[in-house]
Image (spheres, rainbow, N blue to C red):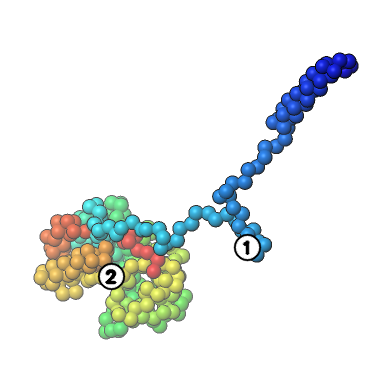
């Protein structure tokens, strides 16, 4: 009930206004959403009526300076890799064991049908060595030069070629790869090399091209069939004199140093063993001997 005196009416009106102000203030703070103050820099970009996303921080290659070029210093622990294969194995047990004893990473490649091939393979595998099949293939000089037992010939039908190759592989369970013995003719023939690579692919084996012919199609056939591949850089002992083998070992080391890796192939000759045993400290100083399986790659 409003007061009757004029003073009382004024006082009542003032306190009513005060209450309304306080209540509406509380309402404004508690209930109404805060007023959004536009940010000066939060711009909405519009082009021809289309709203674009905000401009994120972007760098282009020209604007972001690259690290200055650093001098190339080869890591101390990194040495060039060398694969050293001795093939034509299977005719002398003692020479095979002497060669193997030079270094645990030296890899023997064994001829199928050789008198001691299987027993050398068993002994080598018992020592945890990597082994290869040294697959004979037709040379250009055939029939004057005989590639030997288990050879693959250009005249073979595909079934016979694959059957012969399969039988050789079956003689050496646990081998990791294959390189060609001779083969200057066969490795230059695409259909035959595709057949060879198809079987290698199926068996998960690598191929090392001995490169007995400049016309070899080994690399392209391995690429087509996606077979891990490497190729011979140096033959150590095509001339069997001490000087010549020393020269070839040096050449192999220089290639490894220049390119980071090299593949050398030697044979079970006395002179090869002699030079390798003399030069082994030098070989170990300059390169790391590795197994072929660690060097091969899809070509
Ligand atoms: Zn050979």
Q: How many marks?
A: 2
| Residue 203: % across, % down | 44, 63
Examine the rendering and report whether any part of residue 149 can be seen: no
Query: Which of the two residues, 99 or 53, is positioned nearer the viewer here?
Result: 53
| Residue 4: % across, % down | 88, 15
Residue, disc 2: 232
Q: Which residue is drawn at 11% across and 69% down?
A: 242
Examine the rendering and report whether any part of residue 141 can be seen: yes
**Foreground disc of the pair 1, 2:** 1
| Residue 194: % across, % down | 43, 75
Query: In this rendering, is residue 42 above or below 59?
Result: above
Classed neighbour count for the residue bearing mark 2: other residues with Cα under 10 Å, few (<14), some (14–19), many (≥20): some
Query: Which of the two residues, 30 or 270, is positioned nearer the viewer here?
Result: 30
Query: Which of the two residues, 63 or 11, is positioned nearer the viewer here?
Result: 11
Q: How far apart are marks 1 and 2 (CA)?
A: 64 Å
Query: In this rendering, is residue 41 above or below 272?
Result: above
Q: Residue 66 carries which label?
A: none
Q: Which residue is drawn at 37% across and 73% down?
A: 219
Do tag 1 and tag 2 residues touch (Cβ < 8 Å)? no
Query: What SS does tag 1 mark?
Result: strand
Query: What SS does tag 2 mark?
Result: loop
Quadrant, the C terminus = bottom left
Q: Which mark is residue 47?
A: 1
Query: Which of the two residues, 126 or 194, is positioned nearer the viewer here?
Result: 194
Quadrant, the N terminus = top right
Q: Which residue is drawn at 72% across and 27% down?
A: 26
- Along the polypeptide, which appears first: circle 1 or circle 2? 1
Q: Residue at x 27, y 81 (%)?
A: 145
Residue reaching furthest to the front = 6
Residue reaching furthest to the left = 243
């Amino acid at each position: 009930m409003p007061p009757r005196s004029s003073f009382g009416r004024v006082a009542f009106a003032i306190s009513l206004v005060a209450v309304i102000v306080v209540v509406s203030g509380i309402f404004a703070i508690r209930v109404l959403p805060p007023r959004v103050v536009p940010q000066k820099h939060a711009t909405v970009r519009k082009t021809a009526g289309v709203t674009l996303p905000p401009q994120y921080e972007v760098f282009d290659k020209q604007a972001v300076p690259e690290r200055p070029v650093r001098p190339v210093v080869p890591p101390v622990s990194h040495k060039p890799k060398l694969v050293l294969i001795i093939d034509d194995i299977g005719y002398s047990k003692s020479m095979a064991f002497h060669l193997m004893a030079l270094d645990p990473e030296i890899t023997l490649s064994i001829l199928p049908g050789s008198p001691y091939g299987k027993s050398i393979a068993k002994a080598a595998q018992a020592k945890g060595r990597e082994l290869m099949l040294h697959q004979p293939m037709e040379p250009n000089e055939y029939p004057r030069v005989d590639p030997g037992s288990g050879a693959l010939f250009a005249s073979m039908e595909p079934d016979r070629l694959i059957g012969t190759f399969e039988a050789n592989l079956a003689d050496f369970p646990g081998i990791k790869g294959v390189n060609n013995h001779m083969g200057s003719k066969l490795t230059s023939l695409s259909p035959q090399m595709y057949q060879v690579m198809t079987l290698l692919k199926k068996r998960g084996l690598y191929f090392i091209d001995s490169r007995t012919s400049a016309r070899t199609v080994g690399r392209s056939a391995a690429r087509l069939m996606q077979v891990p591949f490497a190729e011979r850089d140096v033959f150590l002992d095509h001339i069997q004199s001490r000087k010549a083998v020393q020269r070839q070992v040096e050449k192999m080391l220089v290639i490894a140093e220049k390119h980071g890796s090299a593949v050398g192939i030697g044979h079970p000759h006395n002179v090869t063993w002699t030079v390798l045993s003399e030069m082994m400290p030098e070989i170990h100083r300059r390169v790391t001997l590795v197994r072929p399986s660690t060097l091969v790659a899809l070509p």
